[in-house]
Image (cartoon, rainbow, N blue to C red):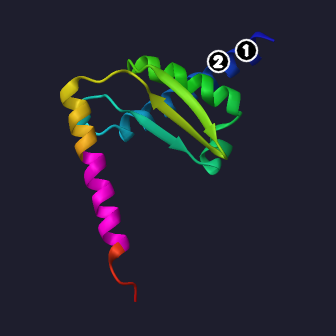
Amino acid sequence: MPVKDELARRRYEKLVDQLESMMRAALKPQFKGYHGQLILSSDDLAELGDLKDVRHAAREAGRRLDWKTTTRLVGDRLFVLDERAAPEEIERLAGDEAAAAIDRARQKSRRPHG
């Protein structure tokens, strides 16, 4: 039985490492580690393994990144989010980026199609 436990522990550690890498890669450098998010599709989840294990590993990976990690399943996607309060200048920058993205989407929707 200990061999099985060791194998399971190694698999779990590999999953944590993989998720940490994905979470780190999803960070925007201008936010200095804040506003982290990772969205895992149903295909991603199928590759990663059992949902319960993925959620647990994502929270562990978040601790490694100093995130206040929460996971939310929405439909067939798992959202892994950093819910820490960001410094004011990061919040302002994130708000400006979100507003610019909304403006771009609105401008695109107003263009004639065809």
Q: Is residue 42 visible?
A: yes
Q: Relative to 21, is 8 on the left or the right?
A: right
- Magenta part, dominant SS: helix
Specify the quadrant of the image occupied by residue 28: top left
Residue 9: which numbered mark, if any? 2
Q: Which residue is mark 1?
A: 5
Q: CA distance from mark 2 to mark 1?
A: 6 Å
Q: Relative to 105, is 71 on the left or the right?
A: right
Specify the quadrant of the image occupied by residue 111: bottom left
The magenta segment is 97-109
Instruction: State yes or no: residue 84 in magenta.
Output: no
**x, y percent for residue 34:** 32, 28
Picture residue at 34% right of the left edge, 37% below the top = 27
**x, y percent for residue 35:** 35, 32
Secondary element type, mark 2: helix
Which sits in the foreground, 77 or 10?
77
Picture residue at 53% right of the left edge, 25% below the top = 70
**In the depicted structure, whether residue 43 falls above or below residue 94:** below
The amino acid pointed to by label 2 is Arg
Instruction: State yes or no: residue 107 in magenta.
Output: yes
Q: Tell me whether the residue at label 2 lies in contact with that at label 1, contact meaning CB atoms closer than 8 angstroms.
A: yes
Picture residue at 69% right of the left edge, 21% below the top = 8
Q: Residues within 10 Å of mark 1 (few under 14, many from 20)?
A: few
**x, y percent for residue 80:** 51, 33
Which sits in the foreground, 17 or 86?
86
